[in-house]
Image (cartoon, rainbow, N blue to C red):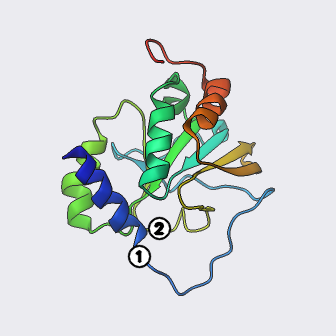
Amino acid sequence: MVRLFWILFFIISTTSCSTTQVKLISVGDILDVTALENQHGKFFENPSALELLLYVNGMTAKDVARASIEKIDLQCLTEGRVAYVADISGMPNIISHLVAVPRMRDYPYPIWLDYDGASTKQLPVKEGNVSVIDIEQGKITNMEFISEESILTKRLISRCGKGINRN
């Protein structure tokens, strides 16, 4: 049932099409995350603390990110040094409010949600990859796509440390 939920979540959230050409962010740009809201309805409180943003767009990338997050010290996510971001603007409101977001509340870390697509439309996406964006003082310093759990886990452990009682 949980697997079906995530499949529906990402199918619905990635099927919306836009005919407007959007300029993607690039190194040197300032990244504004203040409009993002987590699954508990709280806005991103300390954007100056943000060092790394993980953006997933699809089931494969979500699986890689979640598997890696399970192996790290979650404090870096709860403190806002690392942000895990999902665009749920393509999901019907009734599904997001009655099913998806309530299920996300069970996770022990914040998932930053873009309800209208405005905050994530400029984020780079590569199918099957986690978009990993390094940030210093609000500016993007590096962007890469990671498809392998072991590589993403190493990046996250170097930033967050290994989780207690986690492999």
Is 106 situated left or right of 131 in this image? left
Is 135 situated left or right of 117 in this image? right
**Are the two marked residues, 2 and 1, in contact with CB atoms closer than 8 angstroms?**
yes
Is 63 situated left or right of 158 in this image? left
Residue 9, quarter of picture: bottom left
Tag 1: residue type? Ser
Q: Is residue 58 above or below residue 41?
A: below
Asked if residue 81 can be seen in this view, the reply is no
* Local crowd size for mark 1, using a 10 Å CA cut-off: few (<14), some (14–19), many (≥20): few
* Local crowd size for mark 2, using a 10 Å CA cut-off: few (<14), some (14–19), many (≥20): some
Residue 32, quarter of picture: bottom right
How far across and down, in percent of the image, does residue 140 sit?
74, 51
Q: Which residue is drawn at 47% across and 13% down?
A: 164
Tag 2: residue type? Gly
State the residue position of label 2. Answer: 117
How far across and down, in percent of the image, does residue 19 sit?
53, 87
Label 2 vs label 1: CA separation?
10 Å
Q: Residue at x 76, y 59 (%)?
A: 29
How far across and down, in percent of the image, does residue 119 sit?
54, 62
Label 2, secondary structure: give it: loop
Q: Which residue is drawn at 49% across and 24% down?
A: 71
Residue nearer the viewer, 13 or 51: 13
State the residue position of label 1. Answer: 16
Q: Residue at x 32, y 66 (%)?
A: 91
How far across and down, in percent of the image, does residue 74 sit?
49, 26
